[in-house]
Image: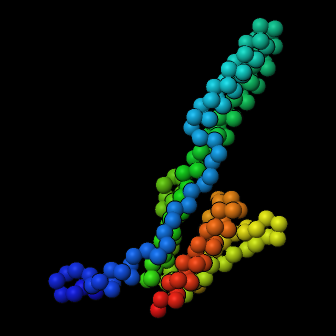
Amino acid sequence: MSDGNGTMGLNEHLSERPVYETELVPHRSLGRKGFRILFAITGILSLVHVIFFLTVGAWPIMLFFGLDFVLLYGAFWLNYRAARAREQIRLSRLDLTIRKIAPNGLVREARYNPFWTKLKIARHPEIGITSMRVAGQGRETPLGDFLYPEAREQLASDLTRALATVKQRI
């Protein structure tokens, strides 16, 4: 609603400010530099073995070393591609928005009224949180499937606290 001259009133502007905002990204322990070093060493070792087996006349084995290298590179390529996934969570007094960005760039967005929203958490006694879902208005959206257990615990704690804060400010 505007105040007559086309601008939002102060109360409306304050209610749209985020109470909680975060971006979830998958954890990868091997960075770009480590990746280059790993593949340089693997490539050199494979090349040495290929040359050795080629000189002793066992040329079919050469194909297996090449295939191993290509498969290893393909596995890392798929892993790094999957790491481009993102989840953005933004909670204000009026809206809870969850944006899921797939590795291919496809964006899916779910919006909830925070007053009717509940965070559903599934726990395993030994592992901790195994899954989280935001539920409300007859639908559910999973959260943080790619996170490690400690990060799921932190997200659950932070989001639960933020939802409670929003619900208290009626």
Seen from this angle, which residue lies furthest left? Answer: 5
Which residue does the image show at 80% across and 70% down from the upper left?
Answer: 124
Q: Nearer the viewer, residue 71 or 134?
A: 134
**Residue 139 is at least partly visible in this image:** no
Image quarter for residue 118? bottom right
Q: Is residue 164 left or right of residue 47?
A: left
Q: Is residue 42 left or right of residue 17?
A: right
Does 143 appear above or below 80?
below
Does 34 appear above or below 7?
above
Q: Position of residue 170 (x, y in %)?
A: 47, 92
Q: Position of residue 4 (x, y in %)?
A: 18, 87
Q: Nearer the viewer, residue 159 or 118?
A: 159
**Residue 125 is at least partly visible in this image:** yes
Image quarter for residue 152? bottom right
Which residue does the image show at 65% across and 34% down from the upper left?
Answer: 73
Q: Position of residue 142 (x, y in %)?
A: 62, 70
